[in-house]
Each structure stands twice: as C-alpha cells, then as structure tokens.
Image (spheres, rainbow, N blue to C red):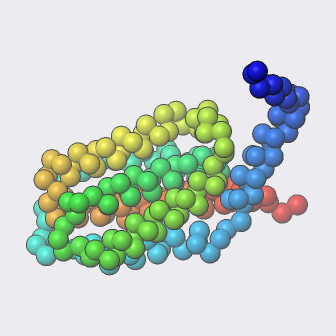
Amino acid sequence: MPAPTTPHTRLPHGTLTLLLLLMALTTSLACQHMRPQDATFAWDSLNILKAMAPTPPQPCQHYQLPFPFPDILLHTVQPQQAAAIARHILDNLFAILSGHNIPQHWDVKAQHDLLNNLHHYSHHLEHCMPANRMLIKRQGPRNLMLSTNKYFRRIRDFLHTHSHSACAWDHVRLEARACFQRVDTLIRQMKSRATPGPP
C-alpha cells in the first residue's frame, strides 16, 4: 500500500514578499556596521604582500601592461553590489596568488598568511550579498563580473606570455597592491551606503 503523500502548503503571496524583505534586511544588517577587520583588511593585506613578494633581485624592464582595471566598478551605488565586486576581486587574486609558479624569492609563509586573509575576508563578504544573486545582476554597470573576469584573464595571459618570470610576477604584485586599494574603496562605499545617516 503506497504511503500517503504529504500535501504541500502554499505560502500566500504576501508571506513570500515578507520573507524576501526579511532576507534583504538581514543582509543589510550583516554589512551595516564597520568591523575592525573592515578598516584594516587592505592595510594588513598590503603589509603581508610586501613581506611575501619583495622586489626581484635583478632589475626588471617595464612592460606595456595590457590590463587596465575597469574603474566604473568602483562607482557602484548598491552596498550588496560593492560587496559582490570586492569578493570577486579577492577570489580572483586568491586564484592567481595560490598558483605553483610563484617566484622562488617569494616568502611561502607570508603567501600562506595572505591567502588565509583573502579567504576569510571573502567569506565575510559573502554574508553581505543578497541570497538571490540575480539582484546583483539586475543592478549597476552591465556585465559587471564579465569586466572583472576580463581584467584578471589578461593578468593570467600576461604571466603565461612571460613564462611566469620573476619580473612578470613583480608586475602582478603591483596589480595586487592596486587591487587591495580598490577593495578598500569598495568596502568604504559599502559601509557608508549601508549605514543610515543621522536623522
């Protein structure tokens, strides 16, 4: 004898809307207050990067860098979108800096510390993003993530073209430093726009 089926309870339309609003409020509150790590993340990462990747022992020629950053991404008006862009930058940096072709003169312990820092902060930013990721895709500059992906793909291509040389990595180090400064800008925008102004 077949087991009796449990009838599915259909939520009223108003209840579903209320649930979505509560989720959005929870997301906003998760990013509303500046934690100590928010104020120091970029500075801490820059210091670890400096310890990890000193200047190459041999002087490097200056390449024509083929990867301008899409600065329009730094002018987003939505806190959740700023969190999504910052997280995407950090995830791409993590992927590049965790590769096996890093220069021999880079410090392995500092590399591990930096990757840890990137991973933990990226995880924190995930809580600042809406549960429905389609909200991000519908707001702000068109092809938001595609622009970021193109930027980091050019960095990977640059490393490959120059055989992951110490000098090529030094240019990537400079780009990573600039990325931490951009993430700091996004964090500050995210916090200032998530926090309501004085009455």
- Determine the residue positioned at 23% across, 60% down: 100
In the image, taking residue 111 as reference, residue 141 lies left or right, namely right
- Determine the residue positioned at 44% across, 68% down: 116
Observer-nearest of 151 and 48: 48
Q: Quadrant of the N terminus?
A: top right
- When the figure is inspected, residue 56 is found, relative to residue 140, above or below; the finding is below
In the image, taking residue 117 as reference, residue 104 lies left or right, namely left
Q: In the rendered image, which quarter is residue 171 located in?
A: bottom left
- When the figure is inspected, residue 157 is found, relative to residue 97, above or below; the finding is above
Viewer can see residue 172: yes
Observer-nearest of 40 and 26: 26
Viewer can see residue 50: no
Q: Quadrant of the C terminus?
A: bottom right
Q: In the rendered image, which quarter is residue 130 located in?
A: top right
In the image, taking residue 147 as reference, residue 18 lies left or right, namely right
How many tags in the picture? 0
Kindly give the residue lying farthest to the top in the view shown.
Answer: 1
Kindly give the residue lying farthest to the left in the view shown.
Answer: 58
Observer-nearest of 164 and 55: 164
In the image, taking residue 1 as reference, residue 116 lies left or right, namely left
Observer-nearest of 70 and 166: 166
Q: In the rendered image, which quarter is residue 12 located in?
A: top right
Residue 57 screen position, x and y as percent = 13, 76
- Determine the residue positioned at 60% across, 46% down: 81
Residue 125 screen position, x and y as percent = 58, 57
Residue 84 screen position, x and y as percent = 55, 48
- When the figure is inspected, residue 158 is found, relative to residue 16, above or below; the finding is below
Residue 5 screen position, x and y as percent = 79, 25
- Determine the residue positioned at 10% across, 72% down: 58
- When the figure is inspected, residue 125 is found, relative to residue 16, above or below; the finding is below
